[in-house]
Image: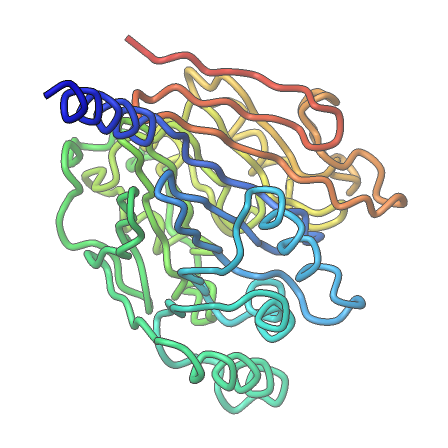
Amino acid sequence: MLKPFLLGIALCASTLIAATKPMEAYFIDVEGGQATLIVSPSGESMVIDTGWAGFNNRDADRIAAAAAKSGVKQIDYLIVTHYHADHVGGVPQLAGKLPIRNFVDHGESVEAGRKEADALYSAYTAVRDKGNHLLVKPGDRIPIKGLSVEVVSAAGNVLGKSLAGAGEPNPACAATQPKNEDKSENARSVGTVIAYGRFRMLDLGDLTWNKEISLVCPNNRLGTVDVYLTTHHGLNQSGSPAVVDAVHPRVAIMNNGATKGGNPDAWQIVHDVPGLEGLWQLHTAESPGAHNTSEEMIANPDSKSDAGNYIKLTAMPNGEFTVTNGRNGFSKTYALKQ
């Protein structure tokens, strides 16, 4: 009887160890675009956007290097937030380096009829059609094992009802005015809330001002998050006070480039959120009048070196998480909030 008893203990121990594995995310430097690799504690992987095409496979190489570092041999889910060159351009090159099982997007491009947009979309669909295609709408879930990934925006539509625990009136709405309607692909971005236990992260792609507001006004349908990937690289076409104050992040990560994103007013809105514990940047913003966080929290301080350093997030299901600068190893742990 001893052997079955010991085997049971061993199985329980292995289950406990598996249950406490972290979620990992690499915010990859694609020079002002987006590419985020997320590795579930189950071992499944998800990439959100792929950066640019060209540049001698630069962006695909950087994604593949992060995948190798985390032991990922295939991309289980690729979310394409929208069809702009800095988000979808690198899909064919990435597919040449790693198998992609499932392609997630919002459907047809609204920029059809423009030569460059048509070429970009055709290059993507030629790869997508070789795999499994998931067309998503707000309220859908992406079935990556070990994580909860809820779609909150897609194809110009947003959640019709609040996520669990959300729905409170948003007092910041009154002071936030709408802007001119954006009819581009940006406004159709696939936005997601990614959760692992008590930990929550928000990624809205390049969703623009008015669509963001419709998610949190008059009531905040998103709730609060631990980590906010600044929308649209920190450009002031997105990231209104109504949104940033509503989601009330503990940490913000800005996927800006040296000369793209990190606008002073957008940066300041994030910086001034009450209770913000950390603002990290992929690049030093070099535009005139730019604001920047402290040097140790910037992955790429020198645009001339083109080093491609990442920012890494490690999250536990109790809500504790750590952010690490891939350039210098500077790391900060954000303890569980009581």
Q: Nearer the viewer, residue 205 or 262?
A: 205
Q: Residue furthest top?
A: 338
Q: Nearer the viewer, residue 50 or 250?
A: 50
Q: Is residue 270 above or below residue 237?
A: above
Q: Residue furthest left?
A: 1
- From the viewer's perspective, tell me whether residue 149 is left or right of residue 31: left
Which quarter shows the C terminus?
top left
Q: Is residue 112 above or below residue 57?
A: below
- From the viewer's perspective, tell me whether residue 104 is left or right of residue 85: left
Q: Could you say which quadrant of the image residue 309 lies in? A: top right
Image spot of residue 247 (x, y percent): 34, 32
Image spot of residue 18 (x, y percent): 32, 31
Q: Nearer the viewer, residue 23 or 190?
A: 23
Q: Residue at x 44, y 83 (%)?
A: 130
Q: Is residue 319 above or below residue 284?
A: above
Image spot of residue 188 (x, y percent): 39, 66
Q: Could you say which quadrant of the image residue 50 lies in? A: bottom right
Which quarter shows the N terminus?
top left
Scheme of colours in the image: rainbow
